[in-house]
Image: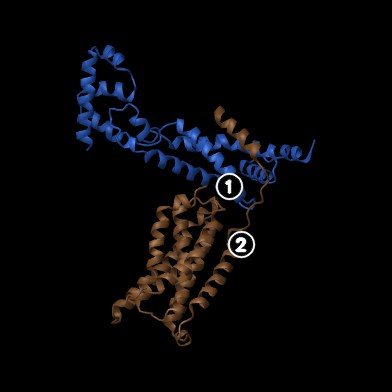
Chain colours: A blue, B brown
Amino acid sequence: MDSSTQSLNNLPEDASSRWTMLATMAQDGQKNAYNMLLNEIGPYIRSTILPTLSNPDWADDITQNVLISVHKSLSTYSASRPFIPWLRAIIKFRRYDYLRKFYSKKELKKTSLDNPDFLNHHVTNPAMTDEYIDIERALDTLPVKQSSVFKKLKIEGRSINEVADEMGMSESAVKVSAHRTIKKLQDILR
Amino acid sequence: MICPKTKNLIGELTDELSSCKPMCRPTLRLLPWGLFSLAYSFAVTLFIGVRDDLSARLAEADFIFEMALALLTSLSASIVSAWISVPDNCGKKANANIPTTLAAILILWYTIKLFTNDYSLHLHIDHCLEGGLLLALMPITALILTLRKGATCSPRLMCAMNILAVGGLSFAIMRLVCSDDTPYHAGVIQIMPFLIAALIMSLASRKIYKW
């Protein structure tokens, strides 16, 4: 058993000290330690950014960007400082960078409420915030049937066929109802 | 849980790993730049030539005050630049208030002088604009090249601090070579190039400090 393997077996339980030690070993060129570090921080990065994103698919992209950044900037880490604040600074920077690039795409600015992906891409995770509260209040002011069609179609994500069958309406009536609801919501929320 | 693509990436990054020496303390890393900038500024001062009334002006309190403010702005901004050149030192971003405040006091000082004295509008730009650019060009390039080796998470603030670091030093040196101390000249002509450079750099900050 070589000295690097012995060191890997004697790592502390506490994540911060453990990652500090692994990062220091990675700076010495120990690939086993580096692989272990990246495999351990990967889920940490993902779990840190996931609740702050509206689309969970982005979490993997940002995680990969952060891992590449960690690789590029490994020499800027100093063992005299804790590892987690260093990592969190990179996570925050890359998350912001990713979202800034995403939202600056021109075609996204043309998106309307008719686009079924709109809510997924333009609001943060509803579980974490009260972003929908204005829309919910506006929906409460509409007739029950109309708001029910809208909720099933646009919030629950059901197809026009399914909604038409459930509500006992024709497909075109469902489309017209949803369209009118969107117009009314736009007027109320404007 | 990490996806297979991320697992592959981790494998690739592990294969690419080579040993790297941890960077020394940010302020130490900036020391060669400081020495170079002082030597370069000294050489340019000799090249342009010091002002005739320098010894008389050095005995005046307001001149010393202006010089001290400019040099302190430069020193504090260069230290903040060094701190924020690594990711985890972003916590020290609040220290950027020190050079910013010093620079604001300098500008305020010139504004007060402008309104409390009767200066004639004298905006000659024959030598000071090019002198200021000559003084600032090499230090700013050297500073950016030095700090690009780090990995800043605040590119805009970094550019602003770079401008204050180089601008403060160049402004102080310009006071040694230019005999026109009027607020119109010192406060406008000699500060203007740095304000324009700051604007350009802030727009390109993410590209300059991309990593």
Whether residue B98 is situated above or below residue B13 in the rendered picture: below
Q: Residue at x 61, y 62 (%)?
A: B28
Amino acid on which the number 2 mark rests in the picture: Leu
Contact between marks 1 and 2 (CB within 8 A): the answer is no
Q: Is residue B63 left or right of residue A79?
A: left
**Image quarter for residue A166?**
top left
Amino acid on which the number 1 mark rests in the picture: Ser
The residue identified by callout 2 is B28
Q: How far apart are marks 1 and 2 (CA)?
A: 18 Å
Q: Mark 2 lies on which chain?
A: B
Instruction: Tell me the element at label 1.
Output: loop
Q: Is residue A128 left or right of residue A70?
A: left
Residue closer to the observer: A36 or A101: A101
Q: Residue at x 62, y 49 (%)?
A: A75
Q: Badge 1: few (under 14), some or many (20 or more) residues near its Cα, within 10 Å?
A: some
Residue most toward the bottom? B56
Whether residue B151 is situated above or below residue A9 in the rendered picture: below
Residue B40 pos. (x, y %): 55, 70
Q: Which chain carries label 1?
A: A
The residue identified by callout 1 is A73
Residue B24, numbered label:
none
